[in-house]
Amino acid sequence: MTQLAFNSFLVAMLSVPVVTLISRRWTKACALPPVLLMGSLAAGVAVAAVGFWGGQRFTVDVSQVASFSFALSVDRLSAFFLLLICSVALPVILFSSSYIPRHYAGVRRHWLWVLLPLFLVSMVLVVTASTAFAFLFGWELMTLFSAGLILMDGDSEQRRHNIFIYLLMMHAGAAAVIGAFLLFLPHAGNFREMRAIATLMPPPMRTAVFLLAFVGFGTKAGIVPLHLWLPRAHPIAPSPVSALMSGIMLKTAIYGLVRFAFDFLGGGPSWWGYLVLFTGCVSGLLGVLYAISEHDLKRLLAYHSVENIGIIYLGLGSALVFTANHVSILAALALTAALLHCLNHAIFKSLLFLGAGAISDAAHTLDLEELGGLQKRMRLTGAAFLIACCSIVGLPLFNGFVSEWLTFRSFLAASELTNLSAAIVLPLAAGVLALIGGLAAACFAKVYGVAFLGRPRSREAESANEVSLPMQAGMGVLATVCVVIGIFPGLVLRGLGTLTEELLPGAALPPTAASLSVLLPWIALFVLVPVAGIAAFKRAKKLTATWACGLPGLDGRMEYTSTAFSKPLRRVFSEVYKADRTLDVVPADQPYFPASISYRSVRTTSFERSLYRPGVDAIVTAANRLRQLQTGNIQVYLLYIFAALIALLMFMRWV
Amino acid sequence: MTLAMNAVQVLLLILLAPLVRGVIARLKARIQNRHGATVWRPYADLVKLFRKEDLVPDSASFVFRLAPIVVFATTLVVAAFVPLLHGSALLGVSGDFIFLVYFLALGRFFLMLGAMDGGSSFGGMGASREALVSTLAEAPFLLALMSVAILAHNGSIAGMVQWTIGQSFFQFSAVHALAFMALALVAIAETGRIPVDNPTTHLELTMIHEAMVLEYSGPSLALIEWASAIKLTVVMALLIALFVPWGIASSLSALALVVASLVLLLKIAALVLTLALVESSVAKLRMYLVPDFLGVASALAILAVVFTALMR
């Protein structure tokens, strides 16, 4: 029965593009694709819930009828990520059902409704595939469909360059992923055989598999220094697509890494864990530091994805260290933290991107310096955005806190390990996580404070109106889920506990995790009762103008700007930014009586320069050298052919 | 009975907090050769403010009036984590020191938002500076608490207190010394005292906390002031509970509780006197020296954690 539901879910998803194309001339049917898509996603949520909580397995195997081995199989890990994809995509599509018709007309709209379901299906393929072929098929399609969706917003020179970088890095990453699969391939094409083979592999081979998977999936996840594409590709996509890319697509990379590192390889030496942990620290810190200096909302959010992937890597890294030290219980705790943060990040990050979409819909800009005072103009959007901010910062009673708390707990528990280096390194990582949390708090106080509070800084922001009802509903659903998981984490934690038990032999979720789900509702009660009590107590209130130091009145231009807000932190961490500043005073010989002064400050990502530039230069130089071979002279080409023939003959002679 | 006692502890913290502030102000006045206001002055201020009306900027949203409530409520929760008179707390659970740090962060986050909702540049300025200080204080705060937790093999503050009572004062380890110094520095930054911030400043350009609450008045201001008084007392109580808990009641008999209360009063008096002396003799740091100040705290906290592993 449930097997049938899974099949019909896949068929329904695939039918959406067909229906869109068939009904494209029939104007009354423009609501059909979103409704159909939401219906199939709801079916997906139900199927995934049965798989995740009930442990039901589904399989679809077409290897018999096709000439290649293509099979899907949903175990608990797949079901968790399937749940993540469907439950987050559902409100995003609800939001899009109003957002897309408002912003895209004609062919573009049809293309969006064709590509969106295909993009979702490709991600479903990735997390449910049980053969290497099916996985890589989904993996490549995911990249292509997302690039297509980005193109829907226009194809200027700059955008094409960014998409080029995106595709280039994705293919480099995919090459590494394919490499990781190829090391298994001569003997095994499906996941069950790969598990068996991995236990027989010699250690260097296992390391090679792990490193290839680490690099390949790391590129997709956007870890530093492989994050270069992320702040370029995510901000230029349509907002709902950014939500899907940041919220869901990055998580497929985490799925891949968990599948390889824990399921196939079953953990490894502890340096694997330290590598992941260190990457997590660097990504988390640099991600949030870069985010603070941004004032374009979507770029800022994109950098926060780098940060949150870092936090997930902190959990994964410590889980690997624990596995290497043979403490499965703690590994289960850390892995649960990482997986839960995947889900939480998917929820609040897609909410934030939808909020950005709502802002650009209402105020026609995403530049924080032009926004302000939106909370009074967009009440529900503002409230939902505030909840998302609290969640991403990891404040208690919101979902981000639960996963960060579990990560902290696993770091604390590491102090009991007999291995000295682990007992020092892991607790110190808690300090890094706390610093990341503090920086994120500063960043989102800036975002919400500048965009939604105070006075509007431009006419557009002043005339902003609340967005349409479906858009509000989409954001409202996600915001509610943030709070529900934040207060009742037991809903997800129990299922995750069973999942980690299956994944790590001999593991069980420690009682501390369970105690959290009992405690949090009480603490929430302890906070909410005073809040409600004081709020109910009617305080006399009078509206007045803010004191303007004797001036006639304040306007938006007098407020603290986003750049000014982040200045102290940028100054303290100036080593990270390496700002390129140019100051032009005209005329130059009269510095005290200038006609005009222009000042420019650009943050240069030092990675771009020192890490990528030499490689790119080397390739270009090599290509230029090789160009000398192409003379355009037919005699020379005949000579090449002759030389190749001789070389081949000699080769044959020796072999 | 234990539950009732724990609730009494929280109430005591809430009700006595303004007095601690009053005593500090009075002591500082005497040290500076002034007469100073009575120690009950903060209570009078609170009563006066609660009777007044809230002046709300015309540009402000619901966040402006929500922020003081959230600040107050989170401070209450934090107070409920700290054992005061006997070795347990109202909300004691494994890993609660993380809650403590993050609930303080929650309150601060909303205070920053409330400040920015006022629409003047002073609020934004205060919020921006608070963001700097609190960001850099969070890591050493958490690490210092964590080092004590590692030492006590217990993740709850009440558990750490129980463990410390079992130790002899003269077996004080290096970890304790390092963690205490780190926490003391963090406590100064966290509660906005000199040399990080000056709670009595009247010059907007040097303000941190005061700039954030500049637009608040009436009951909202009263809630914020009360919350910051509670925060100061709670942080003091936390330092006492973690590092010098001896004298705390081990049973719930009347005699033990009376003794514990007297001992606690003495310890708080000692801390208050120290604070008054320091605040009268040290100048406020320049803003960009605060990161160095907190850098020292971070280094001490990191060393404390490293030592826990090295010394087992």
Image: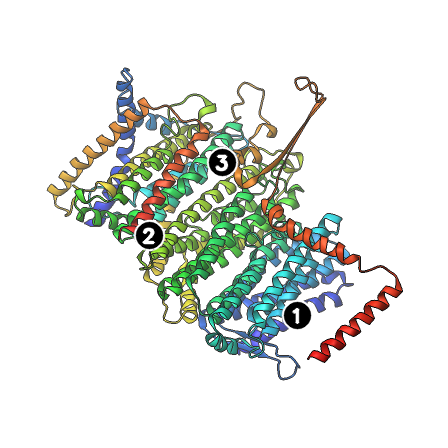
Three-letter code for the amino acid on which mark 3 is drawn:
Val
Please tell me which residue lies in front, A370 or A150: A150
**Which residue matches tag 2?**
B95
In three-dimensional space, the C-alpha distance between marks 2 and 1, rounded to whole angstroms, equals 47 Å
Q: Disc 3 on helix, strand or loop?
A: helix
Amino acid at pointer 1: Leu
The numbered mark 1 sits on a residue in which chain?
A: A
Q: Mark 2–mark 3 contact, CB under 8 Å?
A: no
Q: Which residue is mark 3?
A: A572
The residue where tag 1 is placed is A14
Q: Amino acid at mark 2?
A: Gly
- How far across and down, in percent of the image, does residue B68 sit? 42, 36
Q: As drawn, is A168 to the left or to the right of B161? A: right
* Residue A417 seen in the figure: yes
- For residue A521, say whether it is visible: no
Quote the CA–CA distance across marks 3 and 1: 52 Å
Which residue appears at 51% of the width and 45% of the height? Answer: A386
